[in-house]
Image (cartoon, rainbow, N blue to C red):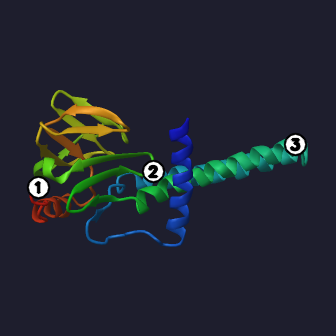
Amino acid sequence: MKRTLLSEARGLACLARWILRRHPGRSPGHFAYNREKKPLIIVFITLLVFESAGTHAVLLAIFGSRWWLWVLFALDLYTVLWAFGYYASMVVLPHRIDDTELRLRYGCLAELVVPREAIRSARPSRRPGAKPGKVIVDGDEATFCCGETTVTLELDPAVELSFRDEHVGHVGRLHVTADDPRAFVTALTTRAAPAPR
């Protein structure tokens, strides 16, 4: 319940950042992953808007202006707002690569952090997607995606990953989604990881 409320609050905050254009965009170290989902989300939001307006108009014509109709309409509007927030979170929360970690995201709903020192290599590689926003482990491989995966990371299996405060286990290979897999791989392999302490 707490996680759901936090993700809804983050979605609304992301919507505000998207409207005000306060997001990293295509700045260095940031990589989009929502290209495949974008058309589907746009169609979904469009259908929501038309369904909400049409249903409200029909109910007003049948029952007149009743308080419970306006409550239903407010709930419809919140659903549309949430859908916009979900899309906005994918735009304002891209994957991020810095000197110490790779932060993989699925909008405001999920985040997986991989230490740079755990990444042995990376290569573009297409595979069918799994359930989005989840870490799916299959043997010594794992998938964290937003649709079809486009990059495969070879990891040090000695480094244990965690997701939502739970241990993922020892994973030797991780499949992820990035809209520009070549640029993503280049950023991972050319920026030097910090020297051992």
Q: Callout 3 environment at 10 Å: few (<14), some (14 to 19), or many (20+)? A: few
Return the residue found at the far front: 197
| Residue to which mark 1 is pinned | 197
Q: What's the amino acid at mark 2?
A: Cys
First in residue order: circle 3 vs circle 2 = 3
Q: What's the amino acid at mark 1?
A: Arg
Label 1 – label 3 distance at C-alpha = 72 Å
Q: What's the amino acid at mark 3?
A: Ile
First in residue order: circle 1 vs circle 2 = 2
Label 1 – label 2 distance at C-alpha = 33 Å
| Whole-percent x, y for residue 107 in the image | 42, 52
Mark in front: 1 vs 3: 1
| Residue to which mark 3 is pinned | 62
Q: Is residue 194 above or below residue 173?
A: below
**Dot label at residue 108:** 2
| Whole-percent x, y for residue 147 in the image | 32, 45
| Whole-percent x, y for residue 156 in the image | 11, 42
Q: Callout 1 environment at 10 Å: few (<14), some (14 to 19), or many (20+)? A: few
